[in-house]
Image (spheres, coloured by chain):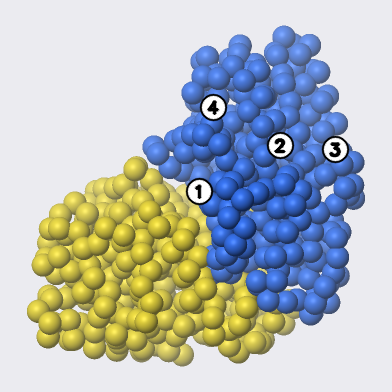
Chain colours: A yellow, B blue
Amino acid sequence: MKKLINAPEQVVKEALAGMADAHADLLTVHYDPDFIVRADAPIANKVGLVSGGGSGHEPMHGGFVGKGMLDAACPGAVFTSPVPDQMLAATKAVSAGKGVLHIVKNYTGDVMNFEMAAELAAAEGIEVASVVTNDDVAVKDSLYTAGRRGVGVTVLMEKIVGGAAEAGADLAEVKRLAEKVNAHGRSMGMALTSCVVPHAGKPTFDLPDDEMEIGIGIHGEPGRTRVKVGHAADIAAMLAAPILEDLPFKQGDHVLAFVNGMGGTPLIELYLMYNELNKILAGQGITISRRLIGSYITSLEMAGCSFTLLKLDDELTKFWDAPVLTPALRWGY
Amino acid sequence: MKKLINAPEQVVKEALAGMADAHADLLTVHYDPDFIVRADAPIANKVGLVSGGGSGHEPMHGGFVGKGMLDAACPGAVFTSPVPDQMLAATKAVSAGKGVLHIVKNYTGDVMNFEMAAELAAAEGIEVASVVTNDDVAVKDSLYTAGRRGVGVTVLMEKIVGGAAEAGADLAEVKRLAEKVNAHGRSMGMALTSCVVPHAGKPTFDLPDDEMEIGIGIHGEPGRTRVKVGHAADIAAMLAAPILEDLPFKQGDHVLAFVNGMGGTPLIELYLMYNELNKILAGQGITISRRLIGSYITSLEMAGCSFTLLKLDDELTKFWDAPVLTPALRWGY
């Protein structure tokens, strides 16, 4: 195992310490229970937004804490759900009396623990609503999931809903918008290589030197198929087709195209994949009105990429464009 | 070779096409000769800033074209210098009568070709000044370099000098500031793995499963030493010590700390390495006043990182903080 770490059990805490020092203007890190929170939380007259999940997907979620996006994020151990104590502490830290929304990716542990935290928070008088993302079209059920997995749409939801919460939307409105983002978005990913979880010390799965996995999950969960590594144009088609059919997206639609790197894929390849996606969509009369290209929801050092398409309307576009100031996304401030 | 590409000879053009579509609000891509230029170039009453080099280091340099940073960038083939025709065309495209600065990394081909382009531009009546970055303390001469290699300081220079040019500084002033950034900055990098140049189809160098290369160049050029992979704390010390001794940096200094990923290293490890660097500097009474953490000057999918320290004063800090709006760096707009 080749990693820039000291010891597997210290990775998350030490990376958090780095974030705490680097971004002290934006966020504060609390330990035991671990959570990252906006430096100015709680914000008066604002719905609090809390997300979280296993570590190893950076910058998600901690890198999205800041103005116009999340109020707090709860990092679990690598690829392991955070515990309810973290979620409860984060919820209390961001509660300003206007309610708190939990943004949860659809993995069994995350869903269960966020539900428990919501009950505990309710018992302390905090109104909590929840939304679960399940945008991955690759498989119906998966290794850690009943139903579809939550992947790239989570990033877009945190930005868009963050914009609405910053603008003063109430809890019901924020929840409605979050559900709309999930309903309008679809994703699919692929891997050229596995990643290595620090505690495991060896690749999560074996992939021959000439094969790739289409429909991979962000923890290396099996996808739809393994095939020989092909051309970027063919890979793009294999990812785009199931997404386009599923919603379905159709001629005349305007979309946000999110081309995401899995952590070990260089930016030059992501721009090349974006170019392929752009050609596919243009061929179907679909217009890319907004885009995000980079490694935002990752699987440690896995090589590969995912596509997420979000069907846009004026409301979604407005809140995507709204100012944001976080470690990983910043514009308009 | 596992890459998200169609064919080695198409990688650069296809990635450029992706950039052109994705960032049409900021930049325009010209082909044959290839260069990326600000969409609003030339800017009246502004010194033009042109950089460039081999592709494979993305987002450098094309991702730094935009307001408050570069006016144009010339991408060569992967790890291959662009040719004078590209540099001349870019220089002419950004020339507004106030002169043009070439920011050149110290590699033999880049230096020679930018010199030729400067002469050609001068023959057409454009005043050109040049600055060469050579901040890599690892080795005195290298595979493609007489003298030290230009690495991370280039990114910081493009931002800081870009701020000054945007504020109206003249060519002599911009050149003075660029030389100051180079004089105030030092870097050193390391690799856990090699990268694979598309045309070569195999790793640039062989590195055993339990070894790392300290002092690596951004094209995989040999560094100072190969040692067993150790703890992040020890790796950070091996990178920081030669940097700190060289300037030298000393107690009371304020620095910009740039922890850069080589392309295949996940962000969680970069924050962990930043934490180690922060502890080392704190122990020597050096304060990190500004920081940049992420993969900004890369070597395709190489795993590893580099540290760059830039000694700050009020002038450098002011232009680092100035607004920037490019694909890869954006704040203040």
Q: Residue at x 57, y 40 (%)?
A: B312
Q: Chain of mark 4?
A: B
Q: Give the residue displayed 59% in from the left and 31% down from the top.
A: B161
Q: Residue at x 75, y 69 (%)?
A: B193
- Residue A191 drawn above or below residue A286: below
Q: Earlier in the sequence, mark 3 or mark 2?
A: 3
Residues at discs 3 and 4 in contact (Cβ within 8 Å)? no
Q: Which residue is mark 4?
A: B164
Question: In the rendered view, does B190 fall on the left or right side of B63?
Answer: right
Query: In the structure shown, which secondary structural element does the residue marked by tag 2 occupy?
Result: helix
Chain letter for mark 2: B
Which disc, if any, is residue B109? 3
Labels 4 & 1 near each other (Cβ < 8 A) = no
Marks 4, 1: nearer the viewer: 1
Subunit of mark 1?
B
What is the quadrant of residue A50 in the picture?
A: bottom left
Q: Do the residues indicated by labels 3 and 4 lie within the same chain of the protein?
A: yes
Question: Which percent across, then down, holds residue B165?
Answer: 55, 24
Asked if residue A190 is positioned above or below residue B13 in the image, the reply reads below
Q: Position of residue A224 (x, y in %)?
A: 52, 82
- Mark closest to the chain's N terminus, 1 or 2: 2
The quadrant of the picture occupied by the C terminus of chain B is top left
Counting residues from the N terminus, which is met first, the one under dot 4 or under dot 1? 4
Residue type marked 2 = Ala
Q: Whole-Å distance between the Cαs marked 4 and 2?
A: 17 Å
In terms of secondary structure, where does tag 4 sit? helix
Circle 1 — which element?
strand
Quadrant in the rendering for residue B8: bottom right
Looking at the rendered structure, the secondary structure element under dot 3 is helix
